[in-house]
Amino acid sequence: MSELPNLLALLGAPGSETNLFGWAASGYVEGAGAAAAHTLLPAAVNDARDDVSSPASLAYANERRAAECLDGVLAILALTASQALYVSKRSPAPPLEEFLAGVRSIFPPLDRQRKQLGSQAGRLAEVLSACALTGRLDFGFAQAGPVSERAGAW
């Protein structure tokens, strides 16, 4: 039993919209699975002597889609964990304090209904995507250098 409140809502509140991100997470998982399938030669290849056609461009598009799905589901995990810590009045482990502050700078905890949750979650996914490509986690405020140089690097 998690001892977390229902729907990650503050006591007495009707609910938290973070529970709706579970639907999006399921979609991302399915999208990543579909994108990870084998990439075959294009169906339009009908000449046995064709040595020009390649599945590389299709494979690249699938890789990009799988990466987008991973970024999206990681953003959902981060914002949901942030909300769980917020409603339970818990603090993260010290190595994660800076990360949590960054997540909350983009996606603040929900204590009332608000709009633009999707765009905020999308921005969080963009930050995580950029980190995967550059090795730098940049939430828009000063960071201590590359991820590998910080305590608790991930």
Image (cartoon, grey):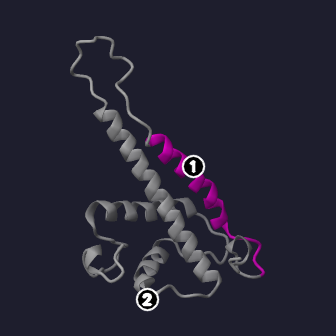
Name the residue rendered at 40%, 85% in the picture: 95
Would residue 120 be seen by someone viewing this image from the given angle? no
Q: Which residue is mark 1?
A: 27
Coordinates of residue 37 in the picture (x, y in percent): 44, 38
Q: Is residue 65 above or below residue 92?
A: above
Seen in the picture, residue 60 relative to 144 is either above or below; the reply is above
Count neighbours of disc 1 (C-alpha within 10 A) and say few if under 14, some if 14 to 19, many if 20 or more: some
Q: What is the x, y in percent for residue 58?
A: 35, 34
Q: Nearer the viewer, residue 111 or 9?
A: 9
Q: How many marks?
A: 2
Residues at marks 2 and 1, CA–CA distance in whole angstroms: 32 Å
Residue 99 can be seen, yes or no: yes
Q: Quadrant of the C terminus?
A: bottom left
Q: Circle 2: is it few (<14), some (14-19), or many (20+) Cα within 10 Å?
A: few
Sequence-earlier tag: 2 or 1:
1
Amino acid type, callout 1? Gly
CB contact under 8 Å: marks 2 and 1: no
What label does residue 123 carry, if any? none
- Residue nearest the viewer, comparing 10 with 69: 69
Element at label 1: helix
User: Which quadrant of the structure image shows residue 146?
Assistant: bottom left
- Label 2 residue SS: helix
- Which residue is found at the position 56% from the left and 74% from the top? 81
Would residue 79 be counted in the magenta stretch?
Answer: no
The magenta segment: 12-35
Residue designated by label 2:
94
Q: Nearer the viewer, residue 65 or 11?
A: 65
Say if 93 sits above or below 140 in the image: below
Residue name at image x 39 percent, y 20 percent = 43
For badge 2, the amino acid type reads Pro
Nearest the viewer among 9 and 95 is 95
| Magenta-span inclusion, residue 26 | yes
